Image: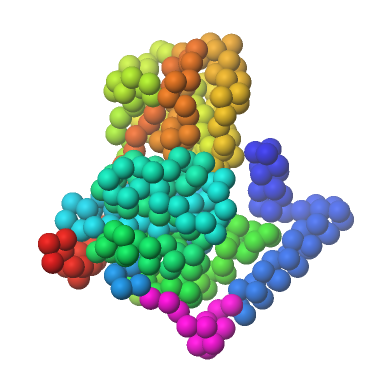
Amino acid sequence: MRDWENAYLKFIHDKPKGFQKNFAFASLRFFSFLFLTGWWIRKMVYRSGLIRRKRLSCPVISVGNLTTGGAGKTPIVIFLAKYFAKQGKKVAVLSRGYGRETKSSSLVWVSDGHKILATPEEGGDEPVLIARNVPQAAVLVCKDRYRAGLEAIKKFKPDLFILDDGYQRRFELHRDLDILAIDGVNPFSTGRVLPAGLLREPLEALSEADIFVINKVNLCRSPEDVRTVLQRHNPKAYLVEAHYKPTVLRDFQTGKEMKSSDLDRVSVGAFSGVANSMSFVRTLADFKVLIHHSYNLRDHYAYTRENLKTILQDAHLRGLQYLITTEKDEVKIPKDMELPVPILVLEINWEALHGKNHWESVLKNIALGCASISA
């Protein structure tokens, strides 16, 4: 599957040569035109008031992106949930739960703010990861975020909501702050909407964001070019630049922490089922960990004992002494799995580098506007 994804990405980003490839790309552009037409119709229907936008009774912060996958929404959601929880606010995170085995229309409580109630198969890997990182937050998944929000209000009584991957739902559901995550590695793909590019909406949709967050800015080829595009489409939005700061390596089974220096002169591999596996490898390089072999799996990869065993056996044959994975992958690995090669988990923190003062000011204002738990 990853090979097909890589071939598709190479095809849309390279200049087509030959009649067949040109014809195939022209077909993709035609479908992109249909996609764009549908987007325009949907936008005009909501803007005209034919369908009213719904509103929840608590402040709503949306974290979304313009491209498919890999923009780094989840680390921002975790940061925000932790921030407001520390301010004494009851936080409810609403997610679609992409990659789960249950129907997208079904409502699942991943966490009730006290304990985790769902597995990654039932609620999705990212919602479970959020629940683990912010145990005091409620996490609900449902395609209909408004329905999930009403359920949370009824049973959890939150002070505010955080929408995970909510930018494309802005026509349907009111939000008080729209944060748009931009992937610093591949910010705008080809500049075209799906399927001739990776944009979920045209670039003009940038004009409706309140804050832009350029994630992985340390891996960005030309941050200035990205800033120019963002400011051209939306000069009023705040601009924040951020990176992932590796904090610790932790043994998957024992929980023992290791330093990157402990892996000097040791043969180490990596495996990850994220949108951009090479970004993970580069983050490890920033942490002074040299990767000898990487298993790059598709995003939201469904681990089984069988496919994990295949990876572990191959790693053992290659002479790898450790395998490193992400926190997102960790939640899907059975704890009682027999490991011929020890697995380490890289923990990261999302950290704002530039635009930090504006960022903190906005969050403080939202916290002040929320009803406190004691109110």
Q: Is residue 149 visible?
A: yes
- For this orientation, the residue located farthest to the left is 374
**Residue 52 lies in the magenta-colored region:** yes
Quarter of the image with the N terminus is top right
Q: Vertical placement of 204 versus 74: above or below?
A: below
User: Does residue 206 appear left or right of residue 367 in this picture?
Assistant: right
Residue 314 horizontal/vertical position (percent): 60, 17
At x 55% / y 12%, what residue is drawn?
A: 316
- The answer to which quarter of the image holds residue 326 is top left
Q: Position of residue 265 (x, y in %)?
A: 41, 13
148 w.r.t. 8: above or below = below
Could you tell whether 349 is left or right of 48 in the image? Answer: left
**Residue 323, horizontal then vertical, whole percent:** 47, 22
Name the residue at 30% across, 30% down: 248
- Of residue 238 and residue 100, the one placed in the foreground of this image is 100
Q: Residue at x 83, y 59 (%)?
A: 23
Q: Between residue 345 and residue 355, name the one nearer to us.
A: 345
Residue 67 appears in the picture as rendered: no
Q: Position of residue 190 (x, y in %)?
A: 61, 59
Which residue is farthest front?
A: 155
The answer to whether 356 appears left or right of 190 in the picture is left
Quarter of the image with the C terminus is bottom left
Give the residue at x 20% y 58%.
89
Residue 171 on the magenta segment:
no
Residue sitting at the far right? 19
What colour scheme does the image use?
A: rainbow
Magenta residues, as a range? Answer: 42-55
